Image: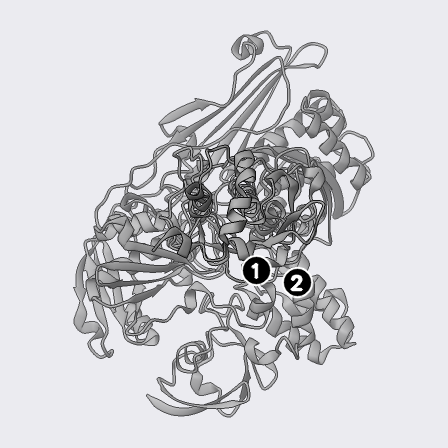
Amino acid sequence: MARMNLDVNGKAHAIEVDPDMPLLYALRNDVGLNNPHYGCGLAQCGACTVHIDGQSVRSCVTPVSAVGNGKIVTLAGLGTPDNPHPIQKAYVEEQVPQCGYCINGWVMTAAAFLNQNKKPSDAEIKEALAGIKCRCGTHMGILRAVKRAAEMMG
Amino acid sequence: MTKMEKSAHFSRRSLLKAAGALVVSVGMPIGLDAVLGIDEAFAQGTKPPLTPDQLSSYVAVNADGTVSAFFGKMDMGQGLFVAIGQMVAEELDVPFKSVRVIMGDTATSVNQGGASGSTGVQLGGKQMRMAAAEARRVLIEMAAVKLGVPADTLTVTDGVVHAKTDATKKASYAELIGGRYFNVQLDWNKEIGNALYAPGKAKPKDHKDYKIVGQPIAREDIAPTVYAQQDFCTDVKLPGMLHGRMLRPPTGGALPLKVDEKSIADIPDAKVVWDKGFLGVVAEKEWDAIKASQKLKVEWSVAKPPFPNQAALYDHIRKAPVRKREIGGKESGNVDEAFKTAARVIEAEYEWPFQSHACMGPACATVEIKDGNVTCWTGSQKPHFVQKGLALTLDVAPEKVRAIWVVGPGSYGRSDADDAAMDAAVLAKATGRPVRVQYTREQATGWDPKGPASVHRARAAMDAAGKVVAYEFTSKGFSRIDVNTNGGAPWDTLAGQLRDVALKSGDGFGVPAESYEFANKRLAWETIPPLLDRGSPLRSSHLRDPVGPQVHFASESFIDELAAALALDPIEFRLRHVKDARDIALIKAAAEKAGWQPRPSPRRDQTGSKVSGRGIAYSQRNGTRCAIVAEVDIDRASGKIWARKFTVAHDCGQIINPDGLRHAIEGNIVQGVSRTLWEEVKFDGRNVTSIDWMTYPILDITETPEQIEIVLIDHPEIAPSGAGEPSIRPVAAAIANAIFDATGVRIRRVPFSPDRVKQSLS
């Protein structure tokens, strides 16, 4: 067990955990955030995605000890209804999710991508999101939403 | 308490004045008691029992005038609850926004079957519509008394009953009953589940008067999900809760012989729960439960490998004894005789693999047993059956069990969710603590009930003039109810089977749903026994549109083969034989929207590696019809297929919410493409080997269609049928027919993975 501080959504959290434990469980159980989801534990689906220093990271395979002083942002910290990230706004406008369990993967990855690429092509958007899973088949809506967000940001 | 005190808002004078109205509207002898009794009869302060024959079981008007609609079916993410809200608001004449649909809790809704067979609107909505109409009728009766005017002079606008000719004579729903409950008996058909129907005396509105039904209304549950304000079934946390993990055997049917608890002695508070084949661990902290499940040393019995090798699957199905054979619908003519005298016979066989629900997240459930009462938080699409299953699993009365659905990681049929609920219950009982059990990805994809694998034989007889005179189609496969479609009984769940309750495998498959007319026609299905009688990772059950994709992949491919054999345009051939007027209109609508130019398949004008083709397929499903034109690009060198464009014509009768419907169709198409191109449960003799997203790949966003065009055919005059599944049904055949059109090669086995396509084309 080790004591460490996590900077999550702009707030410091002191936790005492097994340093080998994946960040996902620290966020869900020790910090008390429900939004990163367990989907596979294998970095294959994206449901656990968070940002560390602006990069999208799969928290299910990231040991909590590897975070260091990195600033973690989860879906809850990305934006709010009053101050949404454009991808969140677009997601609501396009009515994208069905069950919604996959949402962290798409929204957090797209947000990190769009923050770097203001005018992406369709092919670049697809490439940036490759490998993320959605079982309900909302892919058409996801692509519409990312394009809509890119237009808002561009 | 006297009746007068209860009805404090009634003045004696208004009640007396109302007497005339009562004679008209209720038709009973009038005395003051009877007048007072109207209010008493229709409304009361305590809630009547939650039974299907009570109006209060479906509708309540809250003190603020908002309406609660208690729905005993489930929305698993397609926005069904919006449609239900629209139907209730429409019949009650209240604003849509004032209706809240509450579902999935056995304490607040009766068993309308949960999510099942795309019947949310078709059956569940029908009942909610009748209940809301009855509530409106009763509220008008109550207002007639209060206002002292005949009921037939009243109407309702936005939840306010008022005189048609004098809007100042009014009483709001809130004033009439707000915060109290309807005390109105319905005419219940004594069925529960999908078949439940309990109308009142009211007739629902004429569709010509609709203001809310038919409108595109957005979902309000999207924003909470997008802003991380929505908790899922994985997020339930209870005081004193333990975290549980299950251990499954390396070989299907193997049992733990020795469990070395010392192997996890260094993990704080980790404990083993072991009962016959049921093996789990619990710990105070989730990470400790995970570690314990990974570290626990278990010696498993050496079980005989229960499965054929994957390569032998279809041979196994062909050779297996038929346990049940059923002819679907009515056989026409004399099929066997017609084949004997045929000038030409065309035959083909098609194969479909086991497929997994592969939900986005592995199942998770939490169970608390407290003072003899059991509460379960579950992602199951049928919580009322979970209630029953828990009662049997824990040996308590069903009324002591409450199952609460909390949105889960998708569903798509009888997924692993019901198994998780029972596992959590067994762990909770064994430990005396609330337990949250979370399956792993390996368990979710490896151990969920599977969509059944099957072989489909089709043959057609033609006369000398090339006319199809006989058609026979037979499916043979594992049953879709090897385990039942819900976790309502121990023999249907892993927790039951692993504790030695043998499977009670049922027989169910299906036949093509279409309106082709041939002089001699027979559609049949045959089921074969399961491979293992308990705890099988290949036990089969309902997967979205149960057996629909496989049956119609085969039947609609074969219809295309007949058209090609006769060198006819595939749509022209279909229209020669399809007899149902709605089917004809549907196929024509799809063809027109897709810009279909008549010609036979295959097109023979392409050279080189990259070729394109188009294909049509159509099917019915419990009243709904769907026709799909697929336009597909194929890279012959890599075998890679891009299902580039779909044109979908969809007729589900009356459309409740066109926006929700479009989203549902898009999801169906994309999931259908995934199942057609990629999905196949892999296994060896011992166990399932496709256990994650690498070994059980699904469609990637880079392979998403470029365009899905949707033509909605609205029939407001026809009762609505389902839309949750019908449009997944023809996807595989439309793609297969497009591949044939492009290449002249007929692929008769799903999935059309690059390797298989390459092999077929070489």
Amino acid of disc 1: Cys
Q: Is residue B630 above or below residue B366?
A: above
* Residue B654, image x, y percentages: 66, 39
In the figure, residue B246 lies in which quadrant? bottom left
Q: Is residue B153 above or below residue B514?
A: below
In the shown orientation, is residue A60 left or right of residue B628? Answer: left
On residue A142, the disc is: 2
Does residue B627 appear in this view?
no
Which class describes the residues within 10 Å of circle 2: few (<14), some (14-19), or many (20+)? many
The reply to whether discs 1 and 2 touch (Cβ–Cβ < 8 Å) is yes
In the figure, residue B154 lies in which quadrant? top right
In the figure, residue B569 lies in which quadrant? top right
Does residue B125 appear in this view?
yes
Which class describes the residues within 10 Å of circle 1: few (<14), some (14-19), or many (20+)? many
Q: CA distance from mark 1 to mark 2?
A: 10 Å
Check disc 1 and report the residue beneath it.
A134
Q: Is residue B574 above or below residue B119?
A: above
Q: Quadrant of the N terminus of chain A?
A: bottom left
Query: Label 1 is found on which chain of the structure?
Result: A
In the shown orientation, is residue B402 left or right of residue A54? Answer: left
* Residue B718, image x, y percentages: 65, 33
Query: Label 2 is found on which chain of the structure?
Result: A
